Amino acid sequence: MKWAGWWLLFCLNPIAQGAPLSLAAPVEYIPLLRPFYEEWFGKARVDFTFIPCTSARCKKLLDSDSTIDGDIARIKGFEQTHPHMIPVGTAIGEVTIYAQSKQDTSWPPASQERVGCLRGIQWCNRYLDSRRIVWFNDEKQGLALLQRGRTDWVIRLLPTNQSPLAAPWKRVSDIEVYLYLKKSRQADIAALVQSQQQLIASGRWQQMQERYFSALLTPVR
């Protein structure tokens, strides 16, 4: 009976849902967000595994692969086209998108204009013509491309809570990035929201966000 009791307790453990959550993970975000997710999920005692993919491939996996439980970084509103998904708790990041043009023209760019984007900015994939995007690895490289005429615009992002950029930068959009999970993963969602609230209350969540933004904005060597 003692063994039966231990077995029952194990089976009723709300954090044990079988296999780890399979999360579609755009490859450029994996090194940036792995420490963030390890701390968040570790506190919630929820196991996960990243499934590397391009941003477009990740989206297809969410549509077609029933084994995929969520996506590690999607812009708020993703649930409008994927109603079986839900944003989990509070945003993992809130950022402001800025744009600068060589000719100081108004946003948005003309159809033939090329736009330089920092590698990893999902907003560019979502809102710009992929044929007109020129990817760069850090701000210095992006500005050099603009000055040399390789691009007509350059995109930059900053955490929303930082002081806004002055002209010639133009404020384009404010976005929130979330972890998205299937609505069916209610126990995992509840555990993650609870751990998130604890991290926010302790001030640790903000530190995790700052570490993420620092990694995102650090030049790639």
Image (spheres, grey):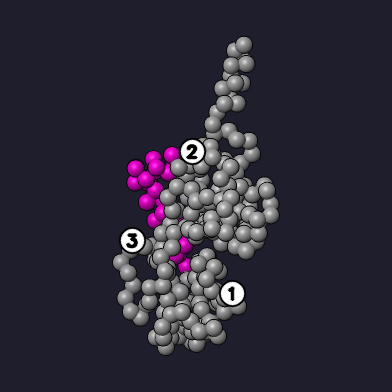
Identify the element where label 1 is drawn. Answer: helix
- Start and end of the magenta stretch? 194-221
Q: Is residue 143 visible?
A: no
Q: Amino acid at mark 1?
A: Ser
Mark sitting earlier along the chain (1/3): 1
Q: Which residue occupies the foreground of this view, 168 or 189?
A: 189
Mark sitting earlier along the chain (2/3): 3
What residue sits 61% from the left and 47% below the top?
Answer: 69
Q: Amino acid at mark 3?
A: Asn
Identify the element where label 3 is drawn. Answer: loop
Q: Is residue 47 left or right of residue 157?
A: right
Q: Position of residue 98 (x, y in %)?
A: 41, 73
Q: Residue furthest top?
A: 1
Which residue position is annotated with label 3? 161
Q: Is residue 63 visible?
A: yes
Please state, as top left, top right, bottom left or bottom right, where the N terminus lies in the image.
top right
What residue sits 48% from the left and 81% below the top?
Answer: 109
Q: Quadrant of residue 174?
A: bottom left
Q: Which mark is residue 191?
A: 2
Identify the element where label 2 is drawn. Answer: helix
Q: Which residue occupies the foreground of this view, 30 or 164?
A: 164
Query: Any magenta on residue 43?
Result: no
Task: Quote the CA–CA distance across marks 2 and 1.
Answer: 37 Å
Q: Is residue 79 above or below residue 116?
A: above
Task: Quote the CA–CA distance across marks 1 and 3.
Answer: 29 Å
Which residue position is annotated with label 1? 130
Q: Mark 2–mark 1 contact, CB under 8 Å?
A: no
